[in-house]
Every structure is written in structure tokens, then in C-alpha cells.
Amino acid sequence: MTSHLRPALVIFGALTLICGVLYPLAVTGIGSTAFPAQAAGSIVEVNGKAVGSELIGQSFTSPKYFWGRPSATAPMANNAAGSSGSNQGPLNPALTDAVKGRIEALQAAEPGNTAPVPVDLVTASASGLDPEISVAAAQYQVRRIAAARGLDTEYVRALIEREMRGRVFGFFGEPRVNVLALNLALDGKSTHTR
């Protein structure tokens, strides 16, 4: 029996050391060296103070700011510890009611806006934490923000254009805008990512 037990324990110890200690240390070291900002959470700082992450959405409710995608996390919105989708299918009445309520809230915030509501303003992403919105979703909000801040709509459109991120590798996904970066640009704050 000890002839079987000893090799099993040696292999168990060796694999624990390799997979549980050495590999995580190597990956963390390489990540921290090659991609220091991303490995540290892509934290956005303004004047040396952390204000959020480029990777996790935040709730903005003031009419002076761009609003991001709804969050599907619980018990509070944009809770990274609760990242997950709602798992509600398109025929689920709860999802239909939630989308109708979000459309009504957007229309109440800007009654004169008759443009179709972009889908990403009324549906959550798969993670429930999406920090970005489509360019169409940003453009949909331009008049509300310009009116609330007393700005020219062309100035707000230029900010969207400046903050727009293109397709990944030129062909994956759609052009998009990071909501936190866009709102900080609206406030005229220079940022630094660490």
C-alpha cells in the first residue's frame, strides 16, 4: 500500500506546488510587467484619486451625464462580486416589463426625443457590468446632456467622437464609448489609468 501511497502524495505535492504556487506567481509577474494598468484593474484616477475602473460600469443618473447600460447585478447595481447576466429570455414577462420601464424613463428624461431608443440603453450585458455603450446610445443622449449643461450639441458630439473606440483589431465588435471616460471628459477632468 505504501508503494502506491507515496508516489501519489509526491505527485499531489508536486502538482500543488506547480499549479497552485509557481504558475500563478509566474502569470501574475508577467501580467504585472507587461500590462501593469490592466493587471491592477485599469483604475481611473483624477488628481491622484481613484474614481472608477475602465472595465466596470458605473451608475450615472443625473441628466448632466451619459447613462450607461443597465446593470443585472444584485443586490446593488454594478457590483463586480455579483457579475452575471439576468438569465431572462426574450419571452420572459419580467424582462419585457423591465425594458418597457427603462424606455419610459428615457422618454421621461427627454420628452422631445423621438429617435428610436438604442437597445443597449435598455438591456443589460451578459456580465451585467458593461462600462461601454454604442455610439448610437451616446448620440441618443446628446440633446439632453447639452440642455442640462448649457452646451452646444456639436461640442457634445465632438466629445463622443474623441472618446470613441474603434473595432478591436479593426473588425471585431462595433465602435463604442466608455461611459466613465466620456463623463469625465464632460467635466473637463484629465484622467490617468493605473
Image: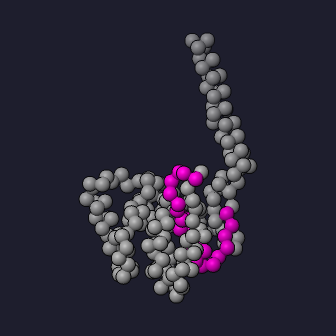
Please give left or right for residue 88 compared with residue 78 in the image.
left
Of residues 28 and 166, which is closer to you in this image?
Answer: 166
Residue drawn at x 71%, y 44% is 30
In the depicted structure, whether residue 50 falls above or below residue 112 = above
The spot of residue 40 in percent (x, y) is: 66, 55
> Range of the magenta residues?
170-193
Please give left or right for residue 104 compared with residue 124 in the image.
left
Residue drawn at x 58%, y 77% is 186
172 within the magenta span: yes
Residue found farthest to the right: 33
Q: Quadrant of the C terminus?
A: bottom right
Residue 70 visible to an observer of this rendering: no
In the depicted structure, whether residue 150 falls above or below residue 47 = below
Residue drawn at x 46%, y 54% is 127
The spot of residue 35 in percent (x, y) is: 69, 51
Residue drawn at x 30%, y 54% is 90
Of residues 18 and 54, which is closer to you in this image?
Answer: 54
Please give left or right for residue 5 compared with residue 89 in the image.
right
The answer to which quarter of the image holds residue 56 is: bottom right
Q: Quadrant of the N terminus?
A: top right
73 within the magenta span: no
The spot of residue 169 in percent (x, y) is: 59, 51
The spot of residue 161 in percent (x, y) is: 57, 70
Q: Colour scheme in the image?
A: one colour
In the depicted structure, whether residue 2 falls above or below residue 14 = above
